[in-house]
Amino acid sequence: MADKMVELASRQQGFLGVESVRDVTGAGITVSYWDSLEAIDLWRHNAAHKLAKQKGKDEWYKSFALRISLVEKDNLLY
């Protein structure tokens, strides 16, 4: 489902990218990047995304949190 949602989001206006990481127990975090609050709101109201999010809350995740943050600077160093 995660791959399907990323593919769907990538076709949505304002989508900039996604990062996801999981540990050995399966716990993880996924961060999606958008160019505006309006783009985030459009994604939030996408019917397929709403269904996937509800299924996640009901069946897949012990806990679920949503945070909307502004990235002001990104200096990715390897």
Image (cartoon, helix red, strand yellow):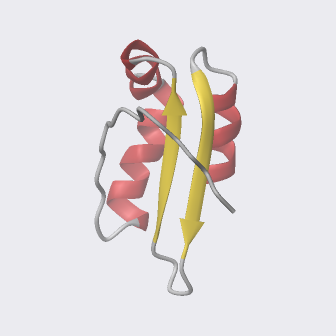
* Residue drawn at (58%, 58%) of the image: 20
Residue 9 locus on image (x, y percent): 61, 30
Residue 70 locus on image (x, y percent): 36, 32
* Residue drawn at (49%, 48%) of the image: 31
Q: Say whether residue 5 is visible.
A: no
Q: Is residue 32 above or below residue 42?
A: below
Q: Say whether residue 77 is visible.
A: yes
Quarter of the picture holding the C terminus: bottom right
Q: Is residue 45 above or below residue 7?
A: above
Image side of residue 33 versus residue 57, left or right: right
Residue 7 locus on image (x, y percent): 71, 36
Q: Could you tell me how many numbered marks the image carries?
A: 0
* Residue drawn at (49%, 35%) of the image: 49
- The front one of 50 and 64 is 64
* Residue drawn at (33%, 56%) of the image: 57
Quadrant housing residue 23: bottom right
Residue 65 locus on image (x, y percent): 28, 53
- The front one of 29 and 76 is 76
Farthest bottom residue in view: 24
Image side of residue 37 versus residue 28, left or right: left
- The front one of 75 and 9 is 75
